[in-house]
Structures are given as C-alpha cells and as structure tokens.
Amino acid sequence: MLQIHNSLTKQKDIFTPIEEGKVSLYVCGMTVYDLCHVGHARVMVVFDVVTRYLRASGYDVTYIRNITDIDDKIIARANQNGESIQSLTERFIAEMHQDADALGVLRPDQEPKATESMPDMIAMIETLIAKGFAYPSDNGDVYYDVSEFDGYGKLSGRNIEELRSGERVAVNEAKNDPLDFVLWKAAKPEEPAWESPWGRGRPGWHIECSAMSSTCLGEQFDIHGGGQDLQFPHHENEIAQSEGAHGCQSVNYWMHNGFVRIDDEKMSKSLGNFFTVREVLARYSPEVVRYFILTSHYRSPLNYSDESLEQAKAALTRYYTTLRDTEGQEGVVWQQDTDYGTRFRDAMDDDFNTALALSVMADVRQALNKEPAGSMQAAYLAGLLYSFGDVLGLFQQNAEDFLLGDQQDDLAETVEALIEARKTAREEKDWAKADQVRDELTAMGIILEDNAGKTTWRKA
RNA sequence: GGCUGCGUGGCAGAGUGGUCAUGCAGCGGACUGCAACUCCGUUAACGCCGGUUCGAUUCCGACCGCAGCCUCCA
C-alpha cells in the first residue's frame, strides 16, 4: 500500500486517489530564462520516477508540469540580451526539453504556459475579488487579502502573527497588509501586458499555478509537487487562491523534494553555486546523474560532488557490465516477482524510497552474477533488472553503448587492432609485449576485461 | 529572532528498541601469465549528556553542530 509523506499533514499518509485507479499530478516547473541546473534536474527526475512508479502500480496518471514564461526575471533577461521575450522563452523551453530528454525524463502529459492561460487567471482573480479574498488597489495592482483566508499558513506551519514578526520586506503602500501578495501587476510602459478588468498588466507568479492546475486537473486533484523552497510562500499562496476561489480543499497530497547542495549549501541561481545540467552531462552520462539522484531519498538533501558522481558511475558500470554478458528474458515484469519484486514494491510504496529500491536491485545483480552464464535464471534476473530499470529510468540504453561511451570516429577500430595485437602476443606468451599494449590502452582510458577467452573493453 | 528538518562506518546512503542494509573505497582469498571483471570472506558507525527500558543508534528531554524557509528560487 503506497504511503506518501504529505507536507500538509507532515506525516506519511496512505495514498487514496480521488478517483479510483487514477492520479492527477501537478508539479511546478521552470521559469524559462536560463539553462536548467542540477537542482532542476532533481525535480524532473524525482517526479519522473514518481510518475513511472504510479503507472507501474496500475494508475492512470495525468501529469502536468507548467512553464512560467512571463515574469520579472524573464523581462530583465530579455532586455539585457536585447531579444524579445518570446524568443528568449522559446529558446530556453527548447533547452529545457533537450536536458529533460537527455536525462530520460518522460514528457508530462501537458505543459501549460502562463502566457497561454491568461483568461483562466483573470477569471480566477475576478472570482477572488467577488468572494472578498482580493482587492484591486489604486495603482492597478490586485492583491490577495491574506487575513480573509482562515487556513493561511497551514502548509508551511506558520501563522500570520509569526509571519508578521519575521517580516523583512519593506512595506508596499499599495497593500493593505505587508503579507498580502500580488495577483495582478499593473504594467509599466515598456513591459509586456495583457488586457484585464483592472487595466493592462500581467499575472503574479502564484496565480499561474492555481489557474493552470485547476484548468488541467479540476478544482481538486491528488498530488502537487515541487521543490522545498516553494512551500512558502508559493504553495501557501496557491492554497489560499485555489481554496478561496473554489471553496474546497484543492490538493490532497503535497510532495516537496529536498535541495541539491554543494559543500553543504543550497545550489541556486541566486547564490551562483550551480552546475547546469549541460555541464554535468558533458562529464557524466545521463543515467549516472539519474542514479546519483536516486541514491538518496527525495526529501533528503543531496550533496553534489565529484566523488558522489564517481561512485554512481562505478555502481552503474557494474550493472551494465553484468547486463552486457546476459541477454534479458523478454516480458519479465517485476510486479510478478514475489521475492525481489515484493521488496522493490515495499521500498517504493514507502514514500518512494529509491535508495532502498536500489539495494534490492543490487541483490538482483549479485544473484545474477552467481548464475551460470546463459542459464534461464540468469536471463530471468537480467529481465528483472530491466523491469526495475523501467521504473527508475535506468538501463534504458544498450549496455555496450554505456560502457563504450560516445565513440570518437575510429576509436573502436584502433582499440580492436590493439586488442588483436595483444592477443597474438599472449598466444606467443610474450607477456611483456601484451602488457605494453594494455598499458597503451590504459593510457587511452580503455579498460580491458578478459573473460572466457574473449577480451572486451570499456571506457574508464 | 521565529518556524521546519537533519546529525549513521574512510565516502555516499537506507533502516531498526535486542540478530544483515546496500553501494563506492580498503583488507584477505579464489579466478587470471599478471591484471581487469566476477565470486567468497572481512574490517568498521550510529553528534554530546541525561531519562524511560531487562536492553537504545532507534523512544523522551536538554545541549552542541548543520541546513532550509521567513525575499526571487526546483
């Protein structure tokens, strides 16, 4: 039975979908003004695995991940670059897709954009004003009146008084209360703007997600995900908006993933201590990055370091080394395996404990290595590994391709020729020559493996 | 300052009131011409101080340390 740690209740809750057999999932996506970094990769991979696992568990999942394509940073960046907002956002949406695809992240069912959801947002703001949760101000902005919403603070575990005492923002004269947040911003002359009942302007960030999630999934849906940093104020505000407008609980399960850190400090754009997905993929193959992300529980912090990536690479290499030698049996489904399959399910059912699930996979690998090559059981276990891999997004590539890496032109030919030369030397028992050839290959970053009279190679 | 959460072996990282995590690395052995791969064996941990308990790394409390949020942020 699946249990999910719910940020709203601050405990693991048994997952019961609104509609039997179906799951509606909404995740806050990227603001597209720059390349994705490893922190973004974590969100994408984590919720990709959540989606894959829910589907593997028999649920019909509708997965929505929005795109914020209008916002202060986007406007600033476009101006800075001297390019149009649309050109900037289209460019970075394409880059984001490239990164996501590279990481094996399946596309969400829908990726609604803020700029294409204006009527929904405006309608929602009108409803909020009509119900007394929001007020237009003299300067053309519209604000949410936090004091009108009783549950404000229930997600982030704060109350309004605490928030006031911790207030660090300069008071904005247009607001009735410093805690009130903007739903609609009046446009400055040079800024892009949309027509609204309150004049030309653009939406605040928080209203986007409330409008897009309810448009795509309805007034109530099952799971809402995002990074921990969005819990307050973004998700708190989303609750205030959605529940204020609809008068019912909007989300049943809130999931927040932990941060990626560098040297025990949060990786973020504002701190400038980030690696882009592009940079990391230049050094490590995508599944190594996925494996690294899945080695820790999604709610724990994940410290990024070369050593961790190297460890992930070493671990994944062992799997692929095993899989290279064994053809997986077709049609093996882990759900039908009463030993490893059950343990895997138990791990994943426990709030998506991927670290524990990986240890089950390690046991399968070891069992497989003990089986005689070519045996039925070996083929079965290999098939089982592939089946687990489909849930975690691992073993999606050919073992040979993973182990040999990206081929440079005629590298393979050169290597094969040297292996042949070494083979000859070995047959002549000219060990010095054989070792010299191997050293040469080692210097090229090639590791040899002599197995069953056959020599295979891989990249270091 | 307020609110969350965390502190596990050399590293990464699960988990549990009393008996096994797992991976990387290390050590010993098998295999190998030697290696690599693989297998077998093996070392080693639960921040500190109290309390509850027959027994606590696991529960409770204090303390120390760290991180996140309170402002844009995945």
Image (tube, coloured by chain):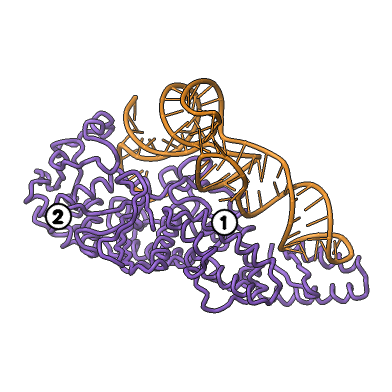
**Amino acid found under the numbered disc labelled 1:** Ser
Residue, far bottom:
A330
Q: Is residue A206 above or below residue A383?
A: above
Q: Position of residue A354 (x, y in %)?
A: 49, 56
Left or right: residue A454 versus residue A352 is right
> Can you say which quadrant of the picture contains the N terminus of chain A?
bottom left
Q: Is residue A116 above or below residue A160?
A: below
Name the image quarter holding residue B70: top left
Is residue A127 visible from the viewing direction of this image?
yes
- Residue at 23% across, 31% down: A164
**Amino acid found under the numbered disc labelled 2:** His
Q: Position of residue A296 (x, y in %)?
A: 51, 50
In front: mark 1 or mark 2? 1
Label 1: chain letter: A
Q: Position of residue A200 (x, y in %)?
A: 14, 55
Q: Which residue is mark 2?
A: A246
Q: Which chain is purple?
A: A
Q: Which chain is orange?
A: B
Q: Are marks 1 and 2 in contact (CB under 8 Å)?
A: no
